Amino acid sequence: MTISKLSASEQEAITDGVLAASLKSQQEKGPALRQVHPKSHGLVWGEFIVENNIPAALKVGVFAAPQTYPIWVRFSNAGEAEKRGKFVSDKEPNARGLAIKLMNVEGKKALDDEEKTQDFILINHPVFFVRDVQGYVDIAKVASGQADPELTQAMQPSFAILQETGNKKVSNPLLIQYWSTTPYKLGSQAIKFSVKPQQQELPDSIPDSENYLHEAIVKYLTYEGKDAFFDFLIQVYVDEEKTPVENPMQEWKEEDSPFIKVATIKIFSQKFDFDERKRLDEGLSFNPWHTLSEHEPIGSVNLARKKIYQELAKYRREEIEKRLREPQPFAFVQDEPR
Ligand code: HEM
């Protein structure tokens, strides 16, 4: 497997640059919210049920034995807040996120801030819009009109992926497929994973409501009293041409590496639309590095996420706490929509 074209010191310096820019944006748009994926459609509970007939080579980490883990699942829109106190409407183009946190997981973890969790983080498109952490900086440069024509031209495939991801018609987050886009270890192998709904998406029209994705989940799980089921699928690395590790802009095609089901996700019919759940949602931290060593993230994009997610979640939690521990005047809190 090839490794990133970036040297370790370049990777680190660029990551620090992204972190500084992200912190600044979070400060402006909502210090107590996630910098990206701030808008939640719901935090719900369920089970992650590991299959009992997994191929021997994939029986690693949380998939080692047929077992049921309790989970929290968070559905989100990827885009930053429009401005302080104002999320982007669900009707606008956006990537949709899915974050899963398994609990009661035993084993050696990559980070020590949580003891017994394993997170899986996905979006509703098979590819990510940049190749490495440098691409994350470059696309922001182009978007803010600070790039030369050559870089602007070079980043067009990234803009095309952003547009394709954002323009997908989504009627309900419980009815669409999600992909990891970036690779992870499975012991000594490299894999990607995907979460596919068992319930079919109906050709539904999009309701005329800013928060229709949240409302669709409430209707499904609470008012209609239905459970939702997803298959958790794994694709195994084949070779650098078909399944590159260092280019999340290239899809690992099903015909090159078929999906293998390793678990079922069950989300129970439930009430979740209340303030206390929203506070839990805003305080939790999902991070691809909340993982057993056997499932560690790989590649430049994933490596950058280690420090960025950790630091931004820490900042977010400190800001939440600061407002409560020693109450601050409005001049500090500044929580009124501008
Ligand atoms: C260099 C690339 C990336 C950067 C800088 C980045 C940045 C971030 C940040 C700052 C957060 C909020 C963390 C927190 O406050 O807890 C976040 C959350 C998230 N990211 Fe990324 N991300 C990157 C790549 C990706 C990729 C490849 C995916 C694809 C699966 C992804 C999907 C998500 C999702 C679904 C969430 C929401 C998690 C939650 O519900 O709490 N991100 N990202």
Image: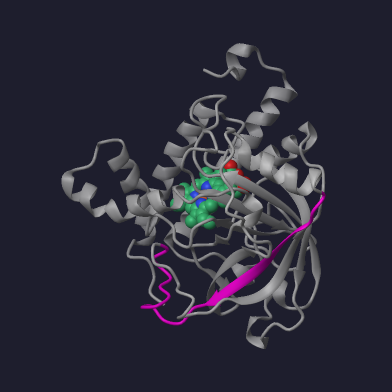
* Residue under the image location 23 percent in, 42 percent down: 147
The image quarter in which residue 248 lies: bottom left
Residue sitting at x 56%, y 72%: 185
Q: Where residue 101 appears, x then y in whole percent? A: 70, 56
Q: Nearer the viewer, residue 319 or 172?
A: 172
- Residue lying at the far left of the rendered structure: 149
Where residue 152 sits: x, y (%)?
Answer: 23, 47
Q: How is the image coloured?
A: one colour
Q: Position of residue 134 (x, y in %)?
A: 34, 53
Q: Residue 337: within the magenta?
A: no
**The N terminus appears in which quarter of the rendering?**
bottom left
In the picture as drawn, the residue positioned furthest to the bottom comes out as 56
Count of numbered marks: 0
Along the line of sight, which residue is nearer the eye, 163 or 112? 163
Per the image, is 247 magenta?
yes
Residue range of the region highlighted in magenta in the rendering: 225-248
